[in-house]
Amino acid sequence: MVTAIDERYERCVVADSRWSRLEDKAARKACEAKGPDARCGLGSLNVQFEADKVTRRARLAGVQAFCDGFPWKWVLEPGPDNEKAKADYVKAHPQGEITIFLRVFDWLKTLGRNPDWVKAPCHTSFW
């Protein structure tokens, strides 16, 4: 998923440099300074940004309390039981913060699995 976003972003920037406005230039420069193996595409940088936010929240709340407050296995351990539990939760809490996260995550996974999306024209929308 992240690699697909990185590839699409690079493709869109080559086609039209205005897409580069989506990127945090300072974050990319700091990432590139880490060396040639660093993943510094738009998707990679955003995942790192979000991971850093989650880490800060976990430290503030206490790691155990933070982990207990979110159904991580629904994201990290796909399978029929977790998919059913996730679907039941989303149905019962359609506007909840966890539901919104799960919907966005599933949407991004769908995009990431679609090679046609990576190669689609960027003239009207990145997504």
Image: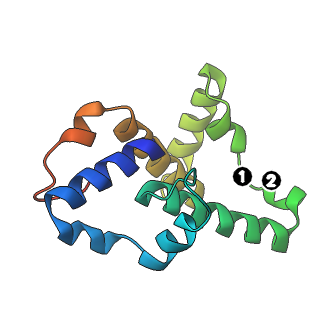
Task: Tell whether label 2 touches label 1 (CB within 8 Å).
Answer: yes
Left or right side of 110 for 13 = left
Residue that appears at 63% across and 33% down: 85
Q: Residue at x 66, y 37 (%)?
A: 76
Image-quadrant location for residue 9: bottom left
**Residue appearing at x 62%, y 22% in the figure:** 79
Residue sitting nearer the eye, 26 or 60: 26
* Quarter of the N terminus within the rendering: top left
Q: Dot 1 lies on which element?
A: loop
Rounded to the nearest angstrom, the CA distance separating label 1 from label 2 is 6 Å
Q: Is residue 113 above or below residue 19?
A: above
List x then y, in percent, for residue 100.
Answer: 49, 56
Specify how the rendered protein is coloured.
Answer: rainbow
In the displayed structure, does residue 79 sit left or right of residue 69?
Answer: left
Labelled disc at residue 94: none
| Residue 123 to residue 33: above or below | above
Q: Residue at x 29, y 74 (%)?
A: 21
Left or right: 10 as drawn, with respect to 87: left
- What amino acid is labelled 1 in the image? Phe
Which amino acid lies under the numbered mark 2 shown in the image of this protein? Cys
- Is residue 35 toward the left or the right of residue 124 in the image? right
Dot 1 alpha-carbon crowd within 10 angstroms: few under 14, some 14 to 19, many 20 or more:
few
Q: Position of residue 117 (x, y in %)?
A: 25, 40
Q: Which mark is residue 70?
A: 1
Q: Which residue is mark 2?
A: 67
